[in-house]
Image (spheres, helix red, strand yellow):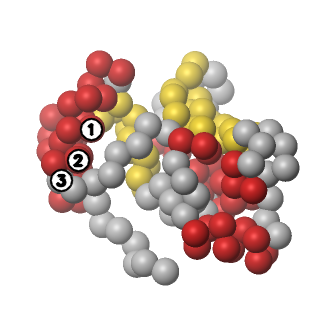
Amino acid sequence: IEPTRIYVKSLLAPIRSGKIAALAHITGGGLLENIPRVLPKGAHAVVDAGAWEQPRLMAFLQAQGNIEPEEMARTFNCGVGMVLAVAETDVAEVTGMLEAAGEIVLRVGTIETGERGCTVRGAAGTWSAKGDWEATHLA
């Protein structure tokens, strides 16, 4: 297991640019509970669990613990250590800044109008699921 990543240096330029609307360090509480903490009222994050490959360690833990994908999204970062909310018009610029700092950038979802919270969705086969699945946490 790798130690917690510190993202400060990588995030300095994007933060100083003023183009990050929100950012969430994904720690205990996983994707479902950490993302809503930084969203304003009326914003709901929708995360596509198929947007990145599940790390081998997460797949191992899931298999050994017989953990459902919904619980994985609620408990672990599932390979995503930091989530940024960025306006569509600023995505390319912020992505460039982060990649220049050595980060791997993935678009994992969208922000929609709705009750403050987060929904993580996966198709059958995503995170070893037998069928399509969805997990939601409302803040």
Q: Secondary structure at mark 3?
A: loop
Q: Earlier in the sequence, mark 1 or mark 3?
A: 1
| Residue 118 visible within the image | no
Circle 1/circle 3 CB separation < 8 Å: no
Q: Residue at x 51, y 27 (%)?
A: 111
Decide: is 103 above or below 120. below
Q: Residue at x 58, y 19 (%)?
A: 113
Q: Which residue is mark 1?
A: 95
Within-10-Å neighbours for mark 1: few <14, some 14–19, many 20+: some
Q: Position of residue 70 (x, y in %)?
A: 75, 52
Q: Secondary structure at mark 1?
A: helix
Q: Quadrant of residue 60?
A: bottom right
Amino acid beneath label 1: Thr
31 or 123: nearer the eye?
123
Q: Quadrant of residue 107?
A: top left
Q: Which residue is mark 2?
A: 99
Q: Quadrant of residue 134?
A: top right
Q: Which residue is mark 3?
A: 101
Circle 2/circle 3 CB separation < 8 Å: yes
Amino acid beneath label 2: Glu
Tell whether 85 sits left or right of 78: left
Q: Position of residue 13 (x, y in %)?
A: 15, 45
The span from disc 2 to disc 3 (Cα, nearest Å) is 5 Å
